[in-house]
Amino acid sequence: MTNSAPSAAPSPSGASPALEEITPSNVEAALAIQVRPEQEFAVTSVAKSLAEAYVHPETAWPRLIVDAGRPVGFLMAFFDIDWKQDGGSVIRSGLWRLNIAAAEQGRGYGRFAVESVAAEIRRRGGRRLYVTWHPGPHGPERFYLNLGFKDTGEKSEEETVGVLELD
């Protein structure tokens, strides 16, 4: 199944990027997605992400990002998880993982991924998109802040928690 986000801009190839479910026919392409070496500290491998999706099928939403049939990235969203916070809990949805292939960065695929997850959260009735990021000079903080995410002041382990209002 291929999904396109309605707000996605045309890709560098002239086609619209799309999301594909991970299947036996594209799992190897997904596993081959590699970020830049200096970014590896900030993102989990696709292999580990797919293992986590396997054990959390009720909340994980893994997708291969393709452009004209060519794999360019991987994302995994989460929906309606019970997020423990200050002794209580809240239900949240957001972007769990985002891996854009090293050679494909800076071409709009990350923005497309975030817009696609936002569209899916809206479709499911959500109003906020959460994400976490590792701080650091080669981390994705500037990318997320430039898309409108706000630092919530929370931490999830060592990561900063950000939120994007979707209303």
Image (cartoon, grey):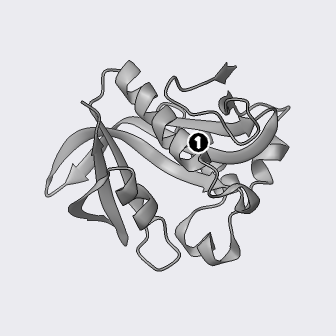
Residue 84 horizontal side relative to residue 76, left or right: left
From the top left corner, tell me how far across and down residue 128 is, in percent. 28, 37
Q: Nearer the viewer, residue 93 or 82?
A: 93
Residue 157 visible in this rendered orientation of the protein: no
Residue 37 horizontal side relative to residue 145, left or right: right
Residue 108 visible in this rendered orientation of the protein: yes
The residue wearing badge 1 is 53
Residue 141 horizontal side relative to residue 98, left or right: left
Total of numbered circles in the picture? 1
Residue located 31% across and 59% down the image? 161
Q: Amino acid at mark 1?
A: Ala
Position of the C terminus by quadrant: top left
Q: Nearer the viewer, residue 126 or 60?
A: 126
Q: Can you tell which quarter of the image residue 95 is in?
A: top left
Q: Can you tell which quarter of the image residue 145 is in?
A: bottom left
Residue located 39% across and 50% down the image? 147
- SS at badge 1: helix
Residue located 21% across and 41% down the image? 90
Residue located 61% across and 46% down the image? 109
Q: Nearer the viewer, residue 45 or 163?
A: 163
From the top left corner, tell me how far across and down residue 71 is, in percent. 77, 43
- Residue 104 position (above or below residue 113): below
